[in-house]
Image (tube, rainbow, N blue to C red):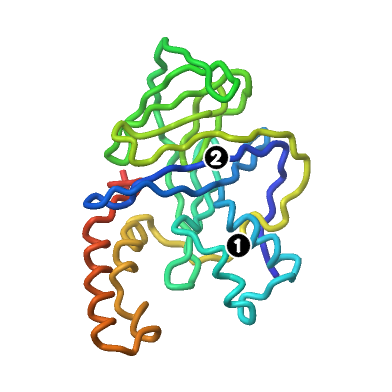
Amino acid sequence: MKSQGFNVLYEADYKMVYKDQKANPTSQEDTFALLINIKASYYKNMKKYVEDSLKYEEKIHEKTDFREGLRFITDFPEYIGTTSGKLYVTLPIGNKPFAYEETNSLKWQIVNEHQSLNGYRCQKAVTKKYVRTWIAWFTRDIPFPFGPYKFNKLPGLIVEVYDENKDYIFSLYNFRKRTYFCKSANMSPHASAVYKNKVFDYQRKEIADPNNYNKLITDPETLSYVLKKARERAQNYNPIELSID
């Protein structure tokens, strides 16, 4: 299987606690791996990290192991590559891979506040991005300017970052040296290039898309109920990014 690899020196693992619904803000959890080298980082969902490795080694096959693949379903399937100048995002839409780039333009205000988190001495920083105010705690003990999701450009690894409403909270739970070449980093190296605004609201639209349910549910009453709930969920969707800017 064709893929795009990434040269790994360290791995930072993060837990994300999030509330993706405004009307019923029940917290959910997911985990992510941040692969790091001197010049760049590569971020992906932990389930995708495992699934992609198995696919690359041909231990599971996408077309024949459908039920097996259900174990790896996540609401956050994107791959995010970070360099000093750009962010490179690859994500599936309707089972087809797409990719976009955006300028890495984060600007932080570093605050003279410190605390200990996960055994690291951390300092506070604040930024405004995607119509949210974000608070980060980074450590100079790990001198890499990277972090989870699209957060980076601080003089040390981000140990924790969250928006002011705490709808999305990322926390480092493991950091280790891992010197290897991850052959399965990006399993969609030939994804179709698009502008970010073309894919920005895809999750909201996909949640309410009746085509996702018509083939699975034959009972009209059940289908009507499921579609109603899907529309409500789409209307109350609370994504990480409230704007593409």
Q: Earlier in the sequence, mark 2 or mark 1?
A: 2
Q: Is residue 79 above or below residue 231?
A: above
The quadrant the N terminus occupies is bottom right
Rendered residue at 27%/39% (across/down): 131
Name the residue type under label 1: Pro
| Residue sitting nearer the eye, 41 or 169 | 169
Q: Tell me if 202 is positioned left or right of 227 in this view.
A: right
Q: Farthest residue toward the top? A: 112
Q: Which mark is residue 226?
A: none
| Residue sitting nearer the eye, 200 or 68 | 68
Q: Secondary structure at mark 1?
A: loop
Q: Tell me if 32 is positioned left or right of 103 in this view.
A: right
**Pointer 1 residue:** 189
Mark in the foreground, 2 or 1: 2
Name the residue type under label 2: Tyr
- Graded by Cα atoms within 10 Å as few (under 14), some (14 to 19) or many (20 or more), the crowding at tag 1 reads some
Q: Quadrant of residue 142?
A: top right
Q: Is residue 163 above or below residue 138?
A: below
Q: Locate residue 99, reporting x and y percent.
A: 48, 59
**Pointer 2 residue:** 14
Q: Is residue 5 above or below residue 179?
A: below
Q: Locate residue 67, reporting x and y percent.
A: 58, 76
Q: Secondary structure at mark 2?
A: strand
Rendered residue at 56%/50% (across/down): 44
Q: Locate residue 120, reporting x and y percent.
A: 59, 20
- Graded by Cα atoms within 10 Å as few (under 14), some (14 to 19) or many (20 or more), the crowding at tag 2 reads many
Q: CA gap, disc 2 to disc 1?
A: 24 Å
Q: Is residue 242 above or below residue 114?
A: below
Q: Tell me if 162 is positioned left or right of 81 in this view.
A: left
